Image (cartoon, rainbow, N blue to C red):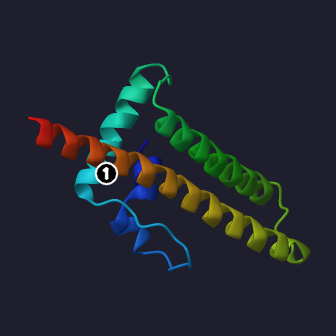
Amino acid sequence: MTDQLSSLDERVLALDEDRPGQPPGADRAEVEAAAGALAEYYLGGRRTDDGLLQQVEAAWAKVEELESRQRDEAAGGLLRRRNWERMALSDEQEDEAVDRYVAAWRRWLDRQAQQGASARSDG
C-alpha cells in the first residue's frame, strides 16, 4: 500500500524527471483520502463496487507486473549489453503504466471532490 501511495504523492513525483503528459500527483489531503480508500479496499478482501477504484487497482496491477518482470530479468542475469535497449523500453513502459495509475487516481479524487462539494451545497 505504501508503494501505491508514494507513486501517487506529488512530493515523490517531483523527484522524478518531468515527462510530457505526466498527470499531476496528489497533495497530502488527497493522499490521505486515497489511503483511506485503499485501507477499506484491502480490509474488505480486495472487493469494491467503486468502478473508479477498480480502475485504479487494475492500473496498479500493470505497474506491479512490469516491475516484477524487470526484477526477474535482472535476477536472471539478463542485463547484458544487448538487453539495455530492451530494459530502456521496459522503463518507458513502466513510466507509462505509473502515469495511467496516477491518472486513474486523479479521476477518483476528482469525483470525491465533486461529491464533497455537492454534499456541502446540499447541507
Taking the image as shown, residue 66 lies to the left or right of residue 120, namely right
Image x and y of residue 95, in percent: 61, 66
Q: Does residue 27 sit above or below 59 in this rendering?
A: below
Q: Residues within 10 Å of mark 1 (few under 14, many from 20)?
A: many
Amino acid at dot 1:
Val
Residue closest to the far left: 123
Residue at the disc numbered 1: 31
Taking the image as shown, residue 97 lies to the left or right of residue 102, namely right
Kindly identify the residue that appears in the image at 31 percent across and 43 percent down: 112
Q: Determine the image quadrant of residue 39.
A: top left
**Quadrant where the image shows the C terminus:** top left
Callout count = 1
**Which sits in the foreground, 116 or 69?**
116
Q: Does residue 78 sit above or below 46 in this rendering?
A: below
Q: Is mark 1 on a helix, strand or loop?
A: helix
Image x and y of residue 42, in percent: 44, 27
**Which sits in the foreground, 36 or 84?**
36
Kindly identify the residue that appears in the image at 50 percent across and 57 percent down: 103
Kindly identify the residue that appears in the image at 75 percent across and 73 percent down: 88
Image x and y of residue 114, in percent: 28, 47
